[in-house]
Image (tube, rainbow, N blue to C red):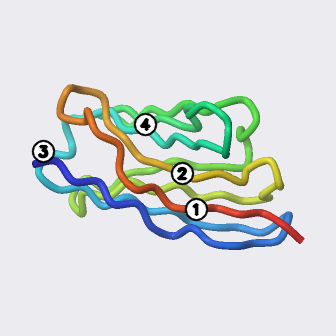
Amino acid sequence: QVQLVESGGGLVQPGGSLRLSCAASGIIFSLYDMAWYRQAPGEERDLVAGIESDGSTHYEDSVKGRFTISRDNAKKTLSLQMNSLKPEDTAVYYCKGVGPEFADWGKGTQVTVSS
């Protein structure tokens, strides 16, 4: 069974940084396109950043220049380095891959940006 476990969230002040991690198991990790999503209370879940199996990346406009998505196929982990954080970045962050293997969402990790 596929398992994706997010970690690294927390409370930070505006302008601060956090690094999120996603540990994968039950899949050949290197074969999948992966992504980070986020969801604030009362809002829909939105794509934040994606990284394809070949390493190419793309970002939602509001996080370009501030967030960096990366992957370590040997360790089967997905990361999101978040710099210059803003209050509007506050949300639960989730990782997910493309494919029917990823039908279920994990628990996510809470990121709160506040003074």
Disc 3 is placed on an element classified as loop
Specify whether 82 is left or right of 88: left
Q: Which residue is mark 3?
A: 28
Residue 93, numbered label: 2
Amino acid type at image mark 3: Ile
Amino acid type at image mark 2: Tyr
**Mark 3, residues whose alpha carbon is within 10 Å: few (<14), some, or many (≥20)?**
few
Q: CA distance from mark 4 to mark 3?
A: 15 Å
Amino acid type at image mark 4: Ile
- Mark 4 or mark 2, whichever is nearer to me: 2
Residue at x 84% of width, y 64% of height: 15
- Mark 3 or mark 2, whichever is nearer to me: 2
**Mark 2, residues whose alpha carbon is within 10 Å: few (<14), some, or many (≥20)?**
many
Q: CA distance from mark 2 to mark 1?
A: 6 Å
Q: Which residue is mark 4?
A: 51
Is the C-beta separation of discs 2 and 1 under 8 Å?
yes
Is the C-beta separation of discs 4 and 1 under 8 Å?
no
Q: CA distance from mark 3 to mark 2?
A: 23 Å
Q: Residue furthest top?
A: 99
Disc 1 is placed on an element classified as strand
Report the label total. Answer: 4
- Mark 4 or mark 1, whichever is nearer to me: 1
Residue 110, numbered label: 1
Going from the N terminus, do you reach mark 4 or mark 1 first? 4
Is the C-beta separation of discs 1 and 3 under 8 Å?
no
Going from the N terminus, do you reach mark 2 or mark 1 first? 2
